[in-house]
Image (tube, rainbow, N blue to C red):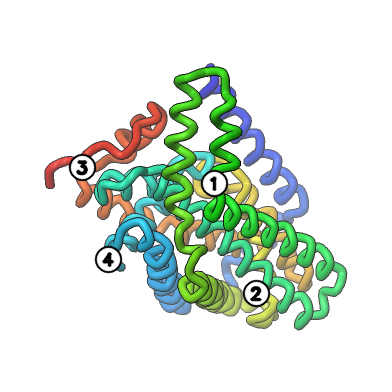
Amino acid sequence: MKSLVKRLILLAITALFLYLVLRKVEPAKLWQALTQVYWPLLVPVVLVYLAGFIPRAQKWRIILGRIKPVSLDGCLGYILVGCAANSLLPARLGELVRAFICGRREQVPATSVLSTIVLERVLEVLSLLVLLCAVVWATGRGELYQLALVGLAVCLGLMAGLFLLQQRPGWLLKLVALLPWPGLRERAQGWLTTFVEGLAVVKSPARLGAVIVLGWAVYLIEGAAYWLLAYAFDMQVTYLQVLFVLCFIFVGMTIPSTVGNIGPLQYFCVLGLGYFGVDSSTALIYSVFINAMMYLTVPLGLAYMHAYGATLSSLRSQIGAGSEAPPPSAE
């Protein structure tokens, strides 16, 4: 029953955002937008987009390295598995899938791996908001500057909280010790201890700085792919304006929905491009191409998953059962 309710909620979220987008779309302009696409340019678009996964893998490798050194190829494989799961499973379960399969293969607690992903996401948002403040200032979108600063302040607060948790976890462990249920108390203490282990990178300013710089590199490369795609659509937008739209798309991708971020991604992409005069129909087709580009990682992720001796259904069931990094299957 709970599973059905969750699915209905996610479906409602997707339907709501699609309705908000489609009510502004003129069907005749959808076909017109498709006829304007310069298809040969899609090849370099995809290549640039995929190239962005290399600094992304290196960034996570630095964070994960404080728990256990993992090769660049290993980190890349785990990330692609997570991306495939995000495209095929609802509610962004790919993050849990990535943590679980990495923990299983590397023989470390999945909770520790998950904490590195949480830290990675917080640092991504921090990097993105700094980038957004710069782009908003450069593009003259002054009405959004204060909003970006508020978001930046919230993210810095989260970062400070994670740093405090890593440096002084005792106060939270004492609070957990007050739980009246022994089973839940022991489980929460174990989870918190392993979670804190994954935050070790915050103790190294050099590593933390490298992670932030690599985060900017990821967004600049991904922004280049999105700008090339906009150029293929003959959109009159600059690279800085596309970076602005990328910030909106990232917001849409953080909202739980059905598979592949469908719905929220479309809405925020259309909203962002609308600031620069791109009509809703063209922006919608553009967002569909972005979704399709993201789905190109699915075969790669499934190939890694097969090499790891796992299936999406088995990982999903083990995560649902609350398993903690079992031994890896024989290869």
Q: Which amino acid type is shown beneath numbered disc 3?
A: Pro
Marks 3, 2: nearer the viewer:
3
Is the C-beta separation of discs 2 and 4 under 8 Å?
no
Task: Find the distance from the CA under tag 3 to the CA under tag 2.
Answer: 42 Å
Vertically, is 75 above or below 192?
Answer: below
Position in image of residue 130 (x %, y %): 68, 72
Q: Which mark is residue 242?
A: 2
Sequence-wise first label, 1 or 3 = 1
110 and 252: which one is in front?
110
Q: Residue at x 67, y 45 (%)?
A: 18
Structural distance between the alpha carbons of marks 1 and 3: 30 Å
Q: Nearer the viewer, mark 4 or mark 1?
A: 1
Quarter of the view holding residue 311: top left
What amino acid is at disc 1? Pro
How far apart marks 1 and 2 lie (CA) works out to 41 Å
Binning the other alpha carbons within 10 Å of mark 4 as few (below 14), some (14 to 19) or many (20 upward) gives few
